[in-house]
Structure formats: structure tokens, C-alpha cells
Image (tube, rainbow, N blue to C red):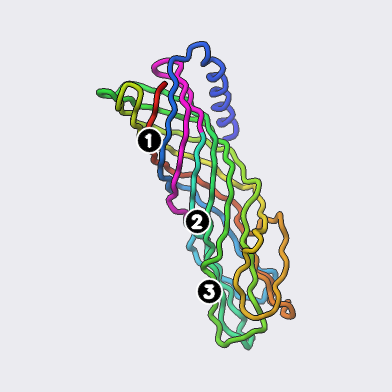
């Protein structure tokens, strides 16, 4: 995979160096689109620091369709071959596996608490594509593109889906947690696509494109968002958490009940392999 990306990137750079010798046309395009999951997903995990709870995970994991925004500069060496350089913004919302934690049968307090992670990603890929363009019907062209992407991004965890269900009221314990977001979320990926370009005037065109993209994030850590504490039961204090660890949700036992342990939620990887549909306007100058 890395060799393939390196070859495409090398071809793109070589092509870019040759363009000033034979460049014929330049254009800039702005487009909006939707991206939907196509084989991608993410790996998440629940864990507790003690064996106090009966733990279960319900499979609710999914990635929803998200908005995309593109700005692209196209440099053509001739009527058929060119290079596109651009940047885009992608948004994906994610629902993680629901974690359910139950009290043991020997406990005087019966019931459970659960949490369904709601996450969102903000991704900014910068990319280069080799383009092949050919006439198609009247005042239309078919464009083929393939290239590499360099992604920057962030992943945030929200806390709207916390549920408590206990057999009796109590004030001897609280649930204390934090909202986390990622830092240093970077990776390489690649894309390939096909598009239809329709002439609106001499220098303006409408375009519609379908793109397949592949990228996977595995190397990232998280940081605490200040002031993003979960509501808790009871009146006792919570605890402190550690920055720089790959934990998105932190559940703190109540002081004095240490055997109950802590509850942690992790994201281990994020695969955004997906299909993107976009449409927009291209201006030639």
C-alpha cells in the first residue's frame, strides 16, 4: 500500500515539474458533496479497571453520511492530461458500541448504568490527482482521476446518551467523566474517481463526480476538554484524569468505593473508506 501511494505521489510530482513547459489551461473548482461509508468503520473498546461489574457491549457501531467541501486547482498539460491539487473538508458522525455495566448479584444496590458513545470527526485532506479527460457527447467531457491524500483531523466524543437504572436511590457514588478529543491525527490515503463535466459557457462548467477514498487512522492520542464534565449522582468529588492517553470517556468511581473501579472507553482505529458524491462549478481562466 505504501509503495503504491509513493508511486502515485512520485508521478504527480514529476508531472507537476513538467507542466510549466507545456501548460495549456488552468481552472479552479468549488464543490459540495456527501460521503457515505463503504467498507470502513472504527474499532472501539470498553474496559473497567476492576472485575466489580458485569460488563456487556451491544453492537450499535456505525458511521453516518457526512458533508464534504472541496476547492481544487486543475493544471492541464494538453487536452487530455492534467494534474489537480486541492483541499477539502469532510465531516463524519459516529455511533460507538453501547457499554452496559451491571452491579454484581451480591451487591445491595442493583441496576446498571450505560453509555452510547456519540462521536464526530473533522477531517481536512490535501490531495494531488492525475487526470485524464476526454470528450463525451455534445459539450461534455468524462474525467478520470487517481491520487494521494494527506489527512489532518480531529475526533471528539460527546456524552448525551448516559443512562442510569438502579433499584433504589443512593448518594454513595457518582459517575464522573470527561469529554475528550484527539490530537496529532494524521495519515495518508488514496482516492480514485470518475466525473462528468458539462459546459455552461465558454469558461464555466458544471461537474458531477463519484470518488472512492481510502484512509485509516491508527496513531492518535487524546486530550481533556476543560469544563466538559458529565453530570453525576451524589455529592462527592470525582477524580482527575490523564492527558495524552488514547481514552475518550473516563468514568470515575466515588471515593471510598475504590473496588468499583473506573470505566474507560477507547477508540483504537478509524477507517474512513467511503464513497463520495460531489457536484460543483468549475471556472477556466
Q: CA distance from mark 2 to mark 1?
A: 27 Å
Q: For residue 278, which quarter of the picture?
A: top left
Distance CA(mark 2)–CA(mark 3): 19 Å
Q: Could you say whether the residue bearing mark 1 is in a helix, strand or loop?
A: strand
> Which residue is tagged 3?
163
Contact check, label 2 and label 1, Cβ < 8 Å:
no
Q: Is residue 174 visible?
A: yes
- Nearer to us: label 1 or label 3: 1
Relative vertical location of residue 47 with respect to residue 121 in this rendering, above or below? below
Q: Along the horizontal axis of the image, is 82 left or right of 244?
A: left
Q: Name the secondary structure under disc 3.
A: strand
Lower position in the chain sequence, tag 1 or tag 3 = 3
Residue range (magenta): 63-86
Dot label at residue 280 = 1
User: Does the segment drawn in magenta span residue 274?
Assistant: no
Q: Quadrant of the C terminus?
A: top left
Q: Which of the two residues, 243 or 271, is positioned nearer the viewer here? A: 243
Identify the residue shown where x is 50% and y is 32%. Answer: 86
State the image coordinates of residue 84 (x, y, percent, origin top left).
48, 27
Mark 2 sits on what residue? 94
Residue 17 at x, y percent in the picture: 56, 17
Q: Secondary structure at mark 2?
A: strand
Amino acid at each position: 500500500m505504501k509503495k503504491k501511494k509513493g508511486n502515485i505521489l512520485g508521478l504527480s510530482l514529476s508531472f507537476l515539474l513538467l507542466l510549466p513547459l507545456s501548460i495549456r489551461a488552468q481552472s479552479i473548482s468549488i464543490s459540495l458533496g456527501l460521503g457515505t461509508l463503504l467498507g470502513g468503520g472504527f474499532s472501539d473498546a470498553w474496559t473497567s479497571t476492576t472485575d466489580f461489574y458485569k460488563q456487556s457491549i451491544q453492537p450499535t457501531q456505525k458511521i453516518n453520511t457526512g458533508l464534504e467541501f472541496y476547492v481544487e486547482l486543475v493544471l492541464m498539460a494538453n487536452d487530455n492530461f492534467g494534474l489537480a491539487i486541492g483541499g477539502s473538508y469532510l465531516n463524519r458522525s459516529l455511533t460507538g458500541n453501547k457499554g452496559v455495566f451491571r452491579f454484581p448479584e451480591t451487591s445491595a444496590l442493583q441496576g446498571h448504568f450505560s453509555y452510547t458513545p456519540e462521536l464526530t470527526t473533522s477531517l481536512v485532506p490535501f490531495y494531488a490527482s492525475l487526470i485524464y479527460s476526454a470528450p463525451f457527447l455534445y459539450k461534455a467531457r468524462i474525467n478520470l482521476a487517481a491520487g494521494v491524500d494527506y489527512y489532518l483531523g480531529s475526533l471528539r466524543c460527546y456524552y448525551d446518551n448516559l443512562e442510569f437504572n438502579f433499584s433504589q436511590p443512593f448518594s454513595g457514588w457518582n459517575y464522573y467523566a470527561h469529554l475528550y478529543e484527539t490530537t496529532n491525527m494524521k495519515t495518508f490515503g488514496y482516492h480514485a474517481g470518475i466525473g462528468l463535466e458539462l459546459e455552461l459557457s465558454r469558461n464555466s462548467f458544471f461537474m458531477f463526480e463519484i470518488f472512492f477514498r481510502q484512509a485509516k487512522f491508527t496513531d492518535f492520542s487524546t486530550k481533556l476538554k476543560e469544563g466538559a464534565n458529565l453530570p453525576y449522582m451524589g455529592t462527592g468529588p470525582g477524580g482527575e484524569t490523564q492527558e495524552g492517553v488514547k481514552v475518550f470517556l473516563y468514568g470515575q468511581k466515588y471515593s471510598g468505593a475504590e473496588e468499583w473501579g473506573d470505566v474507560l472507553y477507547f477508540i483504537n482505529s478509524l477507517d474512513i473508506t467511503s464513497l463520495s458524491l460531489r457536484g460543483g462549478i468549475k471556472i477556466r481562466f
